[in-house]
Each structure stands twice: as C-alpha cells, then as structure tokens.
Image (cartoon, grey):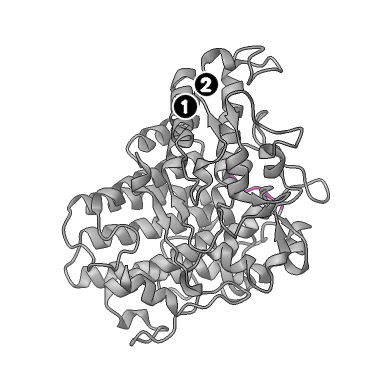
Amino acid sequence: MKIYFKYLIVLIIFGCDSLIPEDLNINPNSPSEAPEDLVLTGSMVGTILFHEGATSRRAGIWSGYFRGTDRQHEGFDNYLVEASDFTAIWNDVFINSLRNAIIVEEKALSSDRSGVITGISKVIQAHGLGVAASLYGDIPFDQAGRIEYIYPEFESQDVVYEKVQDLLTQAILELSLDVNKPSNGSDIFFNGDSYKWIKVANSLKARFYMHTKNYDQAYNYASLGIESPAENMMAIHGDVQGNSNLFYQFFTGSRGTELTSENSKIVEIISSSHSSYRGNSKTNEEARFDFYFSGAGRPNYISGYFSRSNTFPLVSYSENTLTLAESGLRSKNFYTGLSHLNEFRGYMSGGGYLNNGYDTLEMNYNPYIQTDFESGGMENIDNISKEDALLREILEERYVTFYGQIEGFNDVRRTRKETYGIKITPNTGASLPERFLYPQSEIDANPNTPSPIPGFFEPTKINK
C-alpha cells in the first residue's frame, strides 16, 4: 500500500477532475518508460478516478441522486450539456486507466510474465471499456488506448459488450495460472490475490450481462462472483488530501456547493418524512439516510458515505448479491429472487456497508416472506403479481444501494420502459438523459467518430 499512497499523495484534483501525477523518478507523460508494476498502480488510480470522479457525479445528477444548484452543475441539472464537457472524463477512462493497463500487459508479455499481472490488466481494461460502452454507446475497442492508432475506429455497442466478455474470460484464464504476480504493493486493490481478482472478473461479467439484459448469464456469473464483503473491489482512501475520497474532495472544494441531494429522487425514497418513504414494519432506513445525508439531503461528507477516508465501491458484494436477486427472479423463479434479496437484507441488518458508527444506529431489514408480495401484502398494496412486486422491491433496493455510483444510471435506463422500474421525473422538459456525449476533442481529432453524432436524449442501442 505504500506505493499507492506515494502515488496518490502527489495527485491534484483540478476543476475538470483530472488527476495529474507529479515526478515519480519517471516521465509521467511516458509510462512506457516505467516498470509495468508501477504503471499498474497508475492504471488503478485512473480506474478510481473514472468510477468515483466527475463521471459518477454527472451520472448521479441524471439518475435522481443529485441536483446541480449552481454554475456548471446547475447546467447539467437542466440538461444543458456540450461535447466539450466530456473531454476530461473521456480521458479518465481511455488514457488514465485503459492506456496504462494496456502498457502493463504489453510490458509484462515482453518480459515473459503472462499470468496474474496480465490477467489483472485485462480486468481493468474490461472494467473501463464495459462501463464506457454503457455510457457512450459505440466506442473504440480493438484500437482503443493503443498509440499506434491515431484515429481509433469505433465499434458497435453490442459488439463491444461481446468483446468485453471475451476479455474477462481471458483474464480469468490468466489469473487462474496464479503465476507472475505483480510486485508487492503495486496492486492497490488485492495485492496480487488471484482468487479475489477472479471473483471480481465474474462479478463484472454478471454486471455487463445485466446491461444487455441477458439475465440467465448474469445469474450464472454472479454465482461465481463476489461472495463476501472481504472480496470487494474498493477505492481505499486516507486522511490526507491527496488520497481522500473524491466526493469529499469535491464537496469540500470551491465548487462543493454546486451539488446536493436535496429534492432528489433518492431522498424521497429513504426519508421517513416523505410520503414515498420505502420503510415498513420490516424496513427502517433511518441509519442509511443519516449515513448518506445530513439535514434534508445534503450529502454527508463529514462523517458518512462521502467522508474523507471512507472507501468507495467499484465492484462489491452488495451489487453482486442484488444482481443474483434480480437476475434470479427474472431467469429462475420468485423464490430464487426472494432468497437473494433476503441475503442482502441480512447483510444490511448487521450494519452492511454502513460504518463510522452509523452501523449501530436505528435500522431494520428483517427478511421478507412470500405473503409480503402477494396481493394485499405490505409490498403489494396495489394488487399486482407477486413477481412484479418483488421485482419492484429489488430494483428499488438496487437504486438506493447504488447511490453515487455509475450503475445507478445504468439501472434506471435499462428498466426505464418497464412498468416497475425506478421512475425519474425530468428536471426540465419531457425527456430524460440517455447517454454521455462524445467529447469535442474526439469529434475534432478522430474522423472515425460516429456521424451523425447521437444526441443526449437518444438511447444507446442496448436501451432502445
């Protein structure tokens, strides 16, 4: 972990949320000159930046997690976006994370180190490319992040998802060799533990099958995925500004007042004072509300979810268990879905992912039984089928659990046309955001950028 903190201590967050590495006795603009183990650390820091930084904040505004109240974020809240707004966050995934991960793989192969280190690099590549495809639609894949391709070709979103699955399969095979691990401390997530990386890879396969609505496969791979919180892939943070929680850095910076959760969809759902509160005789959300928020919905960056040293989930037991619940219901039966939902509720009853003392506050997540979802039950007062009532509860639980995460944006778009998905009301106008825009830098420099350029309200292929 010392390498990680040395690396992070010299990272600076600017207004555009780029993390810029200072001199680490190498040329930061030429990672190919550095040892692959050090570049691996850099690619992981880039991964954290992509999944926890500006991309997650904007996805959160367009998912009902946040409201923009001033300056740039007020514009995002009103769906006033331009291609130039996406240049820095496009670079977060394609340069800071992907390019460095590719260099790790290339250098390791040239040193005859195929195995765990190359498997990890492939997981990082797949993680970034799969999420990028979910946000942008068609993206470069085969030629992405490779300096020999000045004008990388874009590939269809559905093809990218297929290739991401293949890449994760390759990663699992290489990780299973359990040889050629990265040097001690260079893997800031699991320190070269191939078993945990395989779990993460399977959970990512499940995630991306959820994106494409292949629920049979999602269930199969989630069953092979993360089985306990000890296997979580988390962004670990500390008490100094250089390695503190990225949301904390934003909320305590000069622009922190631009973003709040007051008057948001999620506050409506878990605030006991709101008419849409999801609580009942088996569910008490008071502790989770206080962990997430202070006051009427200001994000809790003092001692809660976004506090200075609080970890941030990248791939987690919570997500994987709720994937088992939803995909199990959709592809198996009611009882499979209910069993996995109750597994998650049992985890939350013990404090779950709440910490910093909030796990000892008032909470209740008692197990549900079938009659709770039957007509007239506590989760079915509108007399729909028990399967639909359970699906509604699982989707709502996923929505609340994914607060601040990109997957919340993916879920609301994936289920938008379904009767019982989370229903977001547009902040303005009659349409909801459906994608991130291609950055102006790519439009100007790459003639292979799709034309005509899809608009902000145009669904990506998998969500049409």
Residue type highlighted by circle 2: Tyr
The foreground one among 51 and 206 is 51
- Residue 218 drawn at (x, y percent): 42, 36
Q: Secondary structure at mark 1?
A: helix
Residue type highlighted by circle 1: Asn
Q: Secondary structure at mark 2?
A: loop
Mark 1, Cα crowd under 10 Å, few <14 / some 14-19 / many 20+, is some
In the image, residue 254 sits, relative to residue 174, either above or below, namely: below
- Residue 393 drawn at (x, y percent): 59, 28
Identified at 40% across, 87% down, the residue is 23
Q: Which residue is mark 2?
A: 368
Q: Is residue 214 visible?
A: no
Judged from this view, the residue extending furthest toward the right is 429
Mark 2, Cα crowd under 10 Å, few <14 / some 14-19 / many 20+, is some
Identified at 55% across, 45% down, the residue is 402
Q: Which residues are magenta?
A: 457-461
Q: Quadrant of residue 421?
A: top right
Identified at 70% across, 33% down, the residue is 277
Numbered circle sitting on residue 342 = 1
Mark found first going from the N terminus, 2 or 1: 1
Tell me, yes or no, whether the highlighted magenta stretch contains residue 409: no
- Residue 104 drawn at (x, y percent): 30, 69
In the rendered image, the quadrant that contains the C terminus is top right
